[in-house]
Amino acid sequence: MKTPFSAARALAPAALLAVLLSACSPTGDPIPPVSESAPKASAPAGTGDVDSDDADERGPADFGHIHGLHADGDDLLIASHHGLFVSGIDGVGADGLMPDGNGPEPRGPLIDLMGFAAGGDALYASGHPGAGTDLPDPVGLLRSDDDGATWEPLSRTGQSDFHALTAAADAVVGFDGALVRSEDGQEWNTIAGPAAFALAGHPEGDTVLATTQEGLWRSEDAGKTWVEPDGGPLLQYIAFADPDTAVGIAPDGVIHVSEDAGISWKAAGNAGEEPGAIAAAVREGDLHVWAAVGTAVVHSDDGGATFNG
């Protein structure tokens, strides 16, 4: 579970933070992919997709913790400690139910999806295998080409647990104790940059943002080089709605919106306490924002000014 920022502007307990900072290597040395191959992970019996005819029988979702969100058309993908779930765009209440009274649909194998990102037509993830899932621990970098129904190990299986993960136009960027970057999902380079708590990019843009206890770091070349914070709000989680529009949530739940890829920010509304993830998308010209707050996922259709929770 990611630890929220404290009032002292810390991302994690002091001991963990020291480990993260010390592990950020500036060497730039390539990190080879692992030699062993792992099978594609699919859903064990009882954990895969739920037939639409049984939708009325779905009970409340047990997320454990929510680690990531992604809006995919009229679906909202929810990456959690207990795997991937799919809800409608209106989100999920603190009771684990959608507004229509049904629980969200579980999808794919049971994996603790600590890192979760969308890159074009693919999803990327990292974390730990659950019961009945035949993957090394940690799972390294996984890719799904079927919206999370199955996952294929790409690299770093048994080595990396990316708690921060994102995809930009030309690369996947992750943090597993060091900031690393890959252009093909196989070969990795360690990058001089921040000890990232959360990362955000857009598959059609080169800007990548990283939240840290010092503030927001920014890269304009898909994570190759980074600029240190220079003012701006302290954000905990961030997401891009398009290559220029970024949305962030502060530790106190206040939403901030940037229309210039993270250079300047304006405060909007408040999504709620205990933020765990954020997503954003432009739908029919309007900025929509989703935020995981506690055990709920709330939705805004007015740019983060108000939320349905």
Image (cartoon, rainbow, N blue to C red):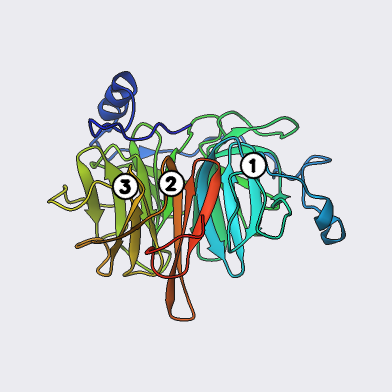
Q: Which mark is residue 229?
A: none
Q: Is residue 294 left or right of residue 258?
A: right
Q: Is residue 190 left or right of residue 81?
A: left
Single out the mark in the foreground, 2 or 1: 1
Cα–Cα span, label 3 and label 1: 25 Å
Is label 2 in contact with label 3 (beta carbons under 8 Å)?
Answer: no
Cα–Cα span, label 2 and label 3: 19 Å
Single out the mark in the foreground, 2 or 3: 3
Residue at (70, 41) in percent of width and height: 39
Q: Please report whichever mark, 3 or 1, sits nearer to the chain's N-terminal start.
A: 1
Is label 3 in contact with label 1 (beta carbons under 8 Å)?
Answer: no
Name above or below for residue 121 compared with residue 96.
Answer: below
Q: Amino acid at mark 3?
A: Ala
Q: Is residue 246 left or right of residue 32?
A: left
Q: Which residue is mark 2?
A: 165
* Front one among 246 and 162: 246
Q: Amino acid at mark 1?
A: Gly
Classify 10 Å Cα crowding around label 2: few (below 14), some (14-19), many (20 and above): many
Residue at (24, 37) in percent of width and height: 213
Q: Which residue is mark 3?
A: 250
Splitting the image into 4 quarters, where does residue 64 fall?
top right
Local secondary structure at mark 2:
strand
Residue 185 can be seen in this image: no
Q: Which residue is mark 1?
A: 83
Splitting the image into 4 quarters, where does residue 262 fall?
bottom left
Local secondary structure at mark 3:
loop
Residue at (71, 60) in percent of width and height: 100
Name above or below for residue 155 compared with residue 99.
Answer: above
